[in-house]
Image (cartoon, rainbow, N blue to C red):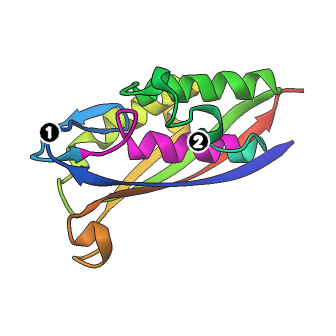
Amino acid sequence: MLRIGHGYDVHKFAKDRRLILGGVEIEYSLGLLGHSDADVLLHAVSDALLGAAGLGDIGKHFPDTAAEFEGIDSRILLRRVVALLDEKGYAVGNVDATVIAQKPKLAPHISKMAENIAADCRVDAGFINVKATTEEGLGFTGELLGIAAHAVCTVVSKQ
């Protein structure tokens, strides 16, 4: 059985925060605000995977009211999501994700982001695709207020 999921996340920029996307720390004057490390890309991927398996969203499993998740590396959360899928008899099929950011330029980091996601999802890198785009100065990302990410995935039944 094949199931499809979609994830979306957004975080606003903040001073004195690191910018982490796809598990990669990117040098930039601003970071993203969030309870965890605010990795908007991994949050979108996690939500897509949970949705495909009918398991809710990351807020359900990793609430921002829980001290144990404060500042947590989102790669840890993604690995926990993959473990939840495994418990339900699913494996990651593929992931296609888009980061929407006016700045910084993300092209030099895309392949490492995809490698990290592949490793955490326990799939070959060829099953993970990460893209980046701007909104040509429009909307909150175009106005440099934050970064958004969309992810679409498939999960497959292991039975």
Residue at the location (59% across, 39% down)? 58
* Residue 3 position (above or below residue 157): below
Residue that protrudes farthest toward the right in the picture:
159
Residue at the location (25% across, 40% down)? 109
Residue at the location (67% across, 21% down)? 83
Q: In which quarter of the image is residue 21?
A: top left
* Residue 82 position (above or below residue 109): above
Q: Is residue 54 left or right of residue 1?
A: left
Instruction: Say which label, 1 or 2, has the lower sequence index.
Output: 1
Q: Does the stretch in magenta take in 49? A: yes
Residue 124 visible to the viewer: no
Name the kind of residue labelled 2 in the image: Gly
Q: x, y (%) of residue 7?
A: 57, 53
Q: x, y (%) of residue 77?
A: 52, 27
The residue tagged 1 is 16
Q: Give the range drawn in magenta.
A: 32-50
Q: Which mark is residue 59?
A: 2
Q: Judge by depth and name the residue closer to the eye, 62 or 126.
A: 62
Name the kind of residue labelled 1 in the image: Asp
Q: Does the stretch in magenta take in 18? A: no
Q: Quadrant of the N terminus?
A: top right
Residue at the location (17% across, 53% down)? 104
